[in-house]
DNA sequence: TACGTTTGTTGAAGCGCTTCGACACTGCGG
DNA sequence: CCGCAGTGTCGAAGCGCTTCAACAAACGTA
């Protein structure tokens, strides 16, 4: 292994000079600098990360805690991961992946000086990790907002605002009965912030608009969507507007509606609250996009600031912006039960 | 920060004794051991990762290079990631996530002593990284098999064998015309190993069985499936057996076949080569499951062996096992064009 | 010319750990 | 009773780097 000493010898300078060339913390004459750089190049020198961490108390590694739950959509999660990692690299940081969410892991990497800071995804309202994270020796940024952030920085999408905007949009078009096809029941059970805040924002907006609304959890896949639609029909017949907060249910919903002969937006208006699907849906949908890329980027930038000594702690909620893609219109027939005997019809006719 | 010295002082021993308690590399009397352990516990001591790496030349971190391509299915990829990380933790290793696949990153983490070894996913037949990886100071295990492994260890699923088994199964049932709905064209364009080997295994088996076959790339989503089916109909009319090697196309395929009034397996037999979908499909399909969990685990275990000094280099191909779930039968009518005017029919009838 | 300043470079200390060789102590056989 | 092997503990060196204080050289100013 080539060390800083080898480089120093090759360049005819001392080790500290090489170090200063690398870090730029002292002025170095152009002549010396270029000799050192040439030596580094020729020897293929890479500083030893451990030695650097030991001496400087910085590892240039950031820990990323990702959820591996059944009920979080893996596509959405990967958007966060991607944006965190690319932003991290822009700041010369590497990313350590933490999946098991037991406290031991957090202690090990933080107090064991493996990372300079942590980004923790999928924070629930009363997340027990928040307590642990505050006691750590390294700064943390949360993606998601707990009830009590305890001096930790947070970034998230304004899910409540998104739900209100969705309802407002539908109400403005004249819809009086609206429903949310929400996250899987499990997400609500464990008090996932995004799930709760959509629900609360929805209810508030429905009340405010003097409309009626139901909020039904929805499992992914065709069967989940059928069950959710059945629940909507039972609990609020005549529903004409659908707010879908469930990426995994979208393709299935469109398939089921088509199968039942329901037109969007002729019969039913649909608004989604979702991370952008990357265009794999059969049709464009009016949506409140979750800016996953921005959220990941901001999380890293906040963390970098804190690592740099910034003591300010803030919670940033990114605002929802509605992008109209023509899947909403004035109320139609609603999500009435399909005519022509529904799902079997096509087969029978074939 | 509490150091090994603090622990030593609290336990009334020397730092080296604490180190030996931790590593178990020397015998320690039970009395001393328990005093040290109590001190560690009370002080909440965590060894400094950098210092440890510097002194021992081991980081206990493994680098995982993941692909972030459009054409690799994110669910499948996450299965690998999950199994690599959990296996790594079982071996007391942390995982550093590398996404940008430029050589600089590989050099930085390997020769910069950030990791003890690398697991590299999504290896193509003539992957330029193979050359780079052989020149690194740390061992590497590939998930995927390049044309020339150059002394690197590899693990992968036997995709060619899976394709042969799929064809064999269909041929055994009497099918004479079979098709593969394959990976997206992009995967083939970049010579992704899994894509090429399925194609080659398929062609070989079709020849061997004296049958006819076509291999068509398939983009994800409903439109992609429609296009692929159209290609099959044009290139090999009367196809009765479908081998699907494309996780993202499966739900869409089932939807399209249902929409066209084609029964599985009455009209068309379907075999998949896919990572297990987790049960979100509307119906079970006869499949050759890609054992992603095993592959990830084996990759880590091979890497651990190499880090431990093992010099043997091997390529392990995990065999395909067909799980019959009733989506295949003796040949039916085939993927003939839909009767009753196909996709518009339901809408018209509603 | 003599002095303070600025600029560029260096030696050495020290970051927290592992590990080697040495050492003290115990219990054994001769 | 001596010597020896085995056991448990320790001191010190050293891993490769950063950074501080110090210094030499070059410069501008009085």
Image (cartoon, coloured by chain):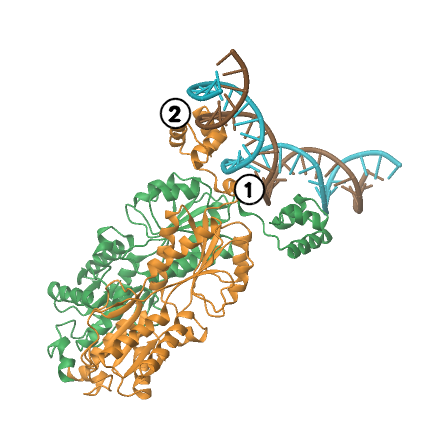
Chain colours: A green, B orange, C cyan, D brown
Neighbour tally class for label 1: few under 14, some 14-19, many 20 plus, Cα within 10 Å = few
Q: Quadrant of the C terminus of chain A?
A: bottom left
For marks 2 and 1, give the one nearer the viewer.
2
Q: Quadrant of residue A274?
A: bottom left
Q: Is residue B285 visible?
A: yes
Q: Position of residue A112 (x, y in %)?
A: 45, 40
The chain carrying label 2 is: B
| Rendered position, B218 above or below A310 | below
Residue B31 numbered mark, or none: 2
Q: Position of residue B56 (x, y in %)?
A: 52, 41
On the same chain, marks 2 and 1? The answer is no
* Secondary structure at numbered mark 2: helix
Give the residue drawn at x 24%, y 75%.
Answer: B254
Q: Position of residue A30 (x, y in %)?
A: 71, 53
| Rendered position, D4 above or below B328 | above
B49 vs B197, left or right, is right
Q: Is residue A26 visible?
A: no
Neighbour tally class for label 2: few under 14, some 14-19, many 20 plus, Cα within 10 Å = few
Residue A56 numbered mark, or none: 1
Q: Position of residue B135 (x, y in %)?
A: 56, 59
Along the line of sight, which residue is nearer the eye, B273 or B67? B273
Along the line of sight, which residue is nearer the eye, A10 or B266? B266
Circles 2 and 1: CB distance less than 8 Å? no
B292 vs C22, left or right, is left
B105 vs B283, left or right, is right
The chain carrying label 1 is: A
B244 vs C9, left or right, is left
């Amino acid at each position: 292994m080539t060390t800083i000493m080898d480089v120093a010898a090759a360049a005819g300078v001392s080790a500290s000079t090489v170090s200063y060339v690398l870090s730029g913390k002292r002025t170095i004459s152009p002549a010396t600098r270029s000799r050192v750089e040439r030596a580094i190049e020729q020897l293929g020198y890479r500083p030893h990360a451990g030695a650097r961490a030991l001496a400087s108390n910085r590892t240039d590694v950031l820990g990323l805690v990702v959820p591996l739950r059944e009920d979080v959509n893996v596509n959405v999660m990967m958007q966060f991961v991607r944006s965190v990692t690319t932003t991290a690299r822009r700041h010369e940081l590497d990313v350590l992946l933490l999946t098991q969410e037991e406290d031991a892991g957090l202690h090990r990497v933080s107090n064991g000086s493996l990372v300079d800071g942590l980004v923790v995804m999928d924070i629930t309202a009363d997340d027990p990790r928040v307590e642990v994270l505050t006691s750590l020796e390294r700064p943390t940024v949360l993606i998601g907002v707990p009830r009590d952030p305890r001096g930790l920085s947070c970034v998230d999408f304004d899910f409540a605002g998104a739900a209100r905007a969705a309802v407002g949009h539908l109400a403005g078009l004249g819809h009086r009965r609206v429903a949310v096809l929400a996250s899987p029941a499990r997400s609500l059970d464990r008090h996932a912030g995004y799930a709760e805040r959509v629900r609360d924002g929805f209810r508030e907006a429905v009340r405010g608009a003097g409309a009626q609304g139901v909020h039904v959890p929805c499992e992914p896949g065709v069967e989940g969507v059928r069950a959710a639609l059945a629940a909507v029909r039972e609990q609020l017949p005549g529903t004409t507007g659908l707010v879908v907060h469930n990426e995994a249910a979208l393709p299935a919903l469109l398939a089921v509606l088509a199968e039942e002969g329901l037109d969007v937006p002729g019969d039913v208006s649909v608004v989604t609250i979702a991370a952008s699907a990357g265009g794999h849906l059969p049709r464009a949908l009016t949506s409140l996009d979750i800016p996953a890329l921005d959220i990941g980027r901001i999380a890293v930038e906040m963390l970098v600031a804190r690592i740099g000594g910034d003591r300010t702690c803030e919670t940033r909620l990114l605002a929802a912006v509605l992008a109209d893609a023509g899947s909403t219109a004035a109320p139609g027939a609603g999500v009435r039960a399909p005519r022509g005997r529904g799902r079997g019809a096509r087969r029978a006719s074939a």
